[in-house]
Amino acid sequence: MPPAKTPALTGNAGTEAAARVADVLLLFTGGPEYLGVSTISRELGLSKAVVYRILQSLVSREVLATDPGVVGYRLGPAAVALGASALRRFDVRTAAEPVLRRLRDATGETTTLSGLVGDERVYLEQFESRAEIKMTVEIGRRFPLHAGSSGKAILASLPLWRRDSVLAGELTALTERTVTDHDALLDELTTISAEGVAVSLGERQAGAGSVAAPLIGPDGEVHGAISVCGPVYRFSQEKIERYRGLVHEAASEITRAWAGPPTTRPR
């Protein structure tokens, strides 16, 4: 005889199961980075067996993940991808547009908005310089985080475990100026993290200069970056210092506009 099939969840049973999964995931939007079975069980009033089955299902789909030597679960790469997809559709573009237009006019250079997608970034929007000779970017194309000011601004703002994961991979040279030495890049990221601004002079694209700052979402996590970019010969040290202040303030303004009312965790 063929094995018996597990009956599909229908009606209220299916709705309840979906609600439990959603409630588990929502717990990861606040509080500690790692959550264990007992904590989730206590917070949601579910049995440990039910919680464990939900967690294993989410891990199998990479929505959650575990780390060696750490007790508990954290958000996985699939959750990051979902968050990045939501970011591209979210009103961060609405919040960023007037700020980036003013930044473009204040600097005379192209301004950009990038989003974090997995362990890479993509350009989501640009406001082109009105200068005859200018830099433009390719919307939607993925770039590594270790090359260019936007990528480094994001990388420097990631949680340490995730930053280390990115740095453990291959650091490919995109130009002769790309920093591919692990220790040198780590030192630079430490400085960027402290100052809140990254600078690139031909590291991602030969002949291009840029200054970028990370975009921190309402959840306190980095979701992307903004930048001023143009021909490297126009990026004198004096202009770079001016752009650093302008970009940092622009990123802070976007973050403030992006922030919404606080969310309440399920009980």
Image: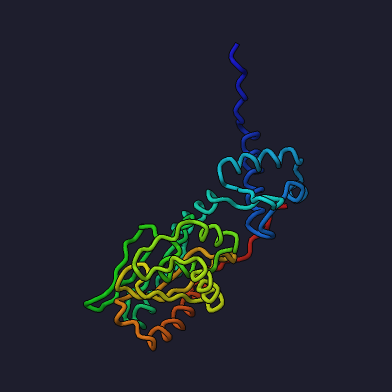
- In the picture, measured across the screen, residue 4 lies left or right of residue 258, that is right
Who's the residue at 53% across and 54% down the image? 80
Instruction: Report the label total.
Output: 0
Q: Is residue 93 above or below residue 235?
A: above
Query: Quick one: which residue is furthest to the left in this view?
Result: 132
Q: How does the figure colour the protein chain or chains?
A: rainbow
Rendered location of residue 224, percent (x, y) = 47, 65
Q: Residue at x 44, y 74 (%)?
A: 212
Q: Quadrant of residue 52?
A: top right
Quarter of the picture containing the N terminus is: top right
Front residue of 174 and 11: 174
Give the image location of residue 160, x and y in percent: 59, 63
Estimate the x, y position of residue 206 in percent, counting from the top left: 30, 70
On the image, which quarter does residue 29 sit in? bottom right
Which residue is found at the position 40% from the left and 70% from the top? 97
Q: Position of residue 72 (x, y in %)?
A: 70, 50
User: Can you name the residue that lies furthest to the top here?
Assistant: 1
Q: Nearer the viewer, residue 16 or 214?
A: 214
Quarter location, residue 176: bottom left
Relative height, residue 46 to residue 246 (above, below):
above
Residue depicted at x 55% and y 57%: 165
